[in-house]
Image (cartoon, rainbow, N blue to C red):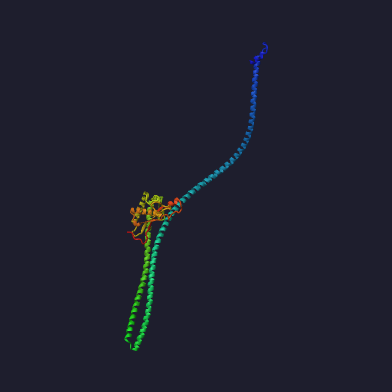
């Protein structure tokens, strides 16, 4: 309509402009616009399609490469599958072998456990035998001391006998000299008698000399006979002393063996009862022929007063000791020795040094056992300070081991007075 208006302004009024021309012009413009849009779209699509073709070619190349890789992977997968099958078979074989080894390992563990138990038993027996050996060594030392005393007594008796024999020998020689003198005097007397018999004028003085010589001869004979009887008696007494000394040694050895055996039985029974009492205590150990209490069980650090827990433990030990004491013969010289030990840390306070502290702790245990009814003449207390350690290392654990109280059932010296 606008075109028609524009076209009609310069024209005469009678000139007509068909309306379809405007419609065709509008349609043509729309067609051109659509065509341009189509061309642009086609160009864009062509550009995109060309780019997609390049991408598609690239993707096809990559797909071809991936296909090759896939084939390689399939081949490798097939090889791996065969290897996996072989490995599966090998795994089954290894599983069977593992089961066999597990069964064998179980058997070995059982055997090892039995061996360990046997080892523990043998270790325990070895510790017990070591304690018994130490005890027997001490008893042997005591017996050696007694035997040494007997040897000294025998040596003294032999020395005395040798002196007596020397004296007898000397007297025998003297008697022989006197006998020779008597023989010479008798010869002289015979000569004088012959001279007197031939002279027939013997004087009273010669007769008196003859009587004196005869009396002296008789006295010498009597003395010689007395010395011979004394020599025979001394020899007989020496033989009897030797027999008596041998019998005394045999009796002494038998008595010592009986006392050692009795003390061994008593110590074994006492240890068995204490083991039952202290079975659940890990802080109380059995070392050889003695029981070892760590000081912390009985005492506070740096103190010598027994704590309540330690009193309960010592009360059980006192009861066991009293039960054993009723069964021990009166003539067996047993004694419970209490040894106190400390570490190397210096003490402070009321105690002078570790000697003083260890001795006072041992005395505290002895006094407590006396209060429980144990006879005082069956107890002994000794303090060693820090001079007999179990572990010489300078560590906290070593010092804890060295702080201890040891109980040992032993015997008194042979010359100690018997208990009343």
Q: Front-most of 388 and 160?
A: 388
Residue 392 in which image quadrant: bottom left
Q: Residue at x 58, y 41 (%)?
A: 80
Vertical side of 385 occupied by 62: above or below: above
Vertical side of 244 occupied by 399: above or below: above
Q: Residue at x 65, y 18 (%)?
A: 25
Q: Residue 53 vs residue 410: left or right?
A: right
Indicate the position of residue 247 as horizontal and vertical percent values: 37, 66
Indicate the position of residue 202 as horizontal and vertical percent values: 33, 87
Residue 128 in which image quadrant: bottom left
Q: Residue 96 vs residue 75: left or right?
A: left
Q: Front-most of 30 and 70?
A: 30
The N terminus: image quadrant: top right
Indicate the position of residue 40 as horizontal and vertical percent values: 64, 25
Indicate the position of residue 204 as horizontal and vertical percent values: 31, 86
The C terminus: image quadrant: bottom left
Q: Front-most of 344 and 339?
A: 344
Give the total number of marks visible in the rendering. 0
Q: Residue at x 36, y 84 (%)?
A: 188
Task: Answer whether residue 234 is visible to the viewer in this image.
Answer: yes
Task: Answer whether residue 17 is visible to the viewer in this image.
Answer: no
Q: Furthest residue to the top? A: 14
Q: Residue at x 38, y 77 (%)?
A: 174
Vertical side of 36 occupied by 177: above or below: below
């Amino acid at each position: 309509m606008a075109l028609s208006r524009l076209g009609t302004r310069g024209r005469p009024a009678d000139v007509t402009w068909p309306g379809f021309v405007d419609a065709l012009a509008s349609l043509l413009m729309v067609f051109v616009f659509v065509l341009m849009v189509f061309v642009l779209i086609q160009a864009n699509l062509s550009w995109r399609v060309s780019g997609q073709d390049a991408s598609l070619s690239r993707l096809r190349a990559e797909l071809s490469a991936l296909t090759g890789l896939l084939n390689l992977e399939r081949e490798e997968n097939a090889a791996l599958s065969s290897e996996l099958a072989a490995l599966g078979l090998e795994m089954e074989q290894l599983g069977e072998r593992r089961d066999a080894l597990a069964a064998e390992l179980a058997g070995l563990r059982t055997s090892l456990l039995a061996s360990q138990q046997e080892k523990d038993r043998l270790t325990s027996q070895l510790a017990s035998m070591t304690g018994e050996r130490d005890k027997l060594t001490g008893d042997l030392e005591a017996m050696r001391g007694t035997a040494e005393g007997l040897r000294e007594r025998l040596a003294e008796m032999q020395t005395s006998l040798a002196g007596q024999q020397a004296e007898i020998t000397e007297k025998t020689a003297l008697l022989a000299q006197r006998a020779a003198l008597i023989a010479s005097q008798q010869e002289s007397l015979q000569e004088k008698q012959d001279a007197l018999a031939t002279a027939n004028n013997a004087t009273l003085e010669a007769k008196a000399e003859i009587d004196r010589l005869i009396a002296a001869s008789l006295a010498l004979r009597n003395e010689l006979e007395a010395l011979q009887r004394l020599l025979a008696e001394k020899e007989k007494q020496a033989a009897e002393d030797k027999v008596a000394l041998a019998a005394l040694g045999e009796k002494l050895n038998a008595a010592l063996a009986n006392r050692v055996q009795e003390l061994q039985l008593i110590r074994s029974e006492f240890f068995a009862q204490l083991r039952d009492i202290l079975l659940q205590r890990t802080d109380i150990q059995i070392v050889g022929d003695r029981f070892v209490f760590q000081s912390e069980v009985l005492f506070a650090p740096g103190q010598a007063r027994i704590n309540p827990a330690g009193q309960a433990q010592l009360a059980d030990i006192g009861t066991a000791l009293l039960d054993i004491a009723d069964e021990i013969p009166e003539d067996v010289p047993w004694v419970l020795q209490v040894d106190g030990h400390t570490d190397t840390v210096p003490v402070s306070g009321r105690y002078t040094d570790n000697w003083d502290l260890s001795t006072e702790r041992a005395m505290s245990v002895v006094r407590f056992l006396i209060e429980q009814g144990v006879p005082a003449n069956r107890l002994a207390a000794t303090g060693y300070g820090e001079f007999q350690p179990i572990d010489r290392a300078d560590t906290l654990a070593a010092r804890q081991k060295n702080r201890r109280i040891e109980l040992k059932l032993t015997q008194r010296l042979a010359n100690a007075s018997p208990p009343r």
